[in-house]
Amino acid sequence: MKPSSASSFGRDVPSAFDGRISLPDASAVFVYASIADLNVAVARRIAKSAALSIGARGVFRIALAGGETPRGCYRELRKMPIDWNCVHVYFGDERCLPRGDAGRNDTMAREELLSHVAIPAANEHAIHAERGAQIAAPEYAVRLQGALPLDLVLLGMGGDGHTASLFPGNAAAAQGDLVVPVFNAPKPPAERVSLSVAALNAAREKMFLVAGRAKRGALAQIAQGAALPAAQITGAEWHIDRAALPEGMI
Ligand code: 6PG
């Protein structure tokens, strides 16, 4: 299999691990010895993407990922030389919980990043998921429409191969709208709002952050061609720590 391009990246992050995994439709796969290395490397790549977007278009529109994996990367991102005045933050998905709830993805983003950088409040575009998925999804689609194409979408992946709030076998994963209401999600809370596969794929750049043993099975399935929701995202960079590498793929 084609070696990943982590080695070219290894010079930046001394302990980057040059793994051997190829994922269908990936634009590149980077494997790191640790999540700490992944966090630094991805933060640097986001800063580079921001500089190029702002240089070219005067703005950088990024959709942040939720869950736990991105926390460390967001902490590293605080340190990066980014012109936050020109950054607009969106969210790949949001959980239908009250504003400020600790379980919300925007709460985590605010804790780990947004409250530590000089981003204008008007540049934070939260999903109003507290209003319920049926109302919040179309409302966000109207607000997002004017921001397309996003410059960069950050994505996590669950152990079942879901991404954003698009879960295997859930009707939302197959919907073509820009933003979709999600019901009966297997990962609590059951009700969520998510950008659709089409909306995520429309971004100029996509980066997955995948770490930990719990992701090995889904990565192995995707490497073997399984059409899991995360595998529907094409042309993405996959940033993976060694712990998430499937058995025998080193
Ligand atoms: C969410 C996220 C979800 C997350 C994955 C991975 O709302 O939970 O949008 O897609 O990225 O479930 O979560 P961890 O990073 O916590 O493993």
Image (spheres, rainbow, N blue to C red):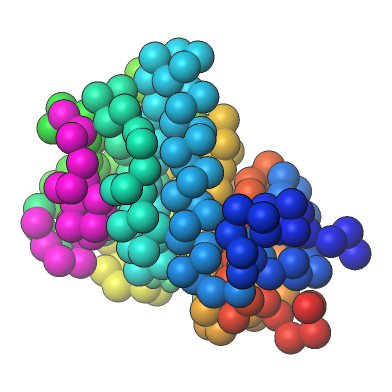
Residue that sits furthest to the right in the current view: 1
- Picture coordinates of residue 153, whole percent (x, y): 47, 42
- Picture coordinates of residue 188, whole percent (x, y): 30, 72
Q: Is residue 90 above or below residue 101?
A: above
Q: Is residue 66 magenta-colored?
A: no
Q: Is residue 188 above or below residue 163?
A: below
Q: Nearer the viewer, residue 49 or 145?
A: 49
Q: Which residue corresponds to the image point at 27% horizontal and 31% vertical from the top-left? A: 84
> Can I make out residue 1 in this image?
yes
- Picture coordinates of residue 51, whole percent (x, y): 46, 27
Is residue 81 rendered to the left or right of residue 121? right
Q: Which residue corresponds to the image point at 72% horizontal and 45% vertical from the top-left? A: 27
Q: Nearer the viewer, residue 49 or 205?
A: 49
Is residue 93 rendered to the left or right of residue 168? left
What's drawn in magenta, residue-wise?
100-120
- Picture coordinates of residue 8, whole percent (x, y): 74, 52
Q: Which residue corresponds to the image point at 58% horizontal and 59% vertical from the top-left? A: 13
Q: Quadrant of ligand 1?
A: bottom left
Is residue 16 rendered to the left or right of residue 162? right
Q: Is residue 18 above or below residue 89?
A: below
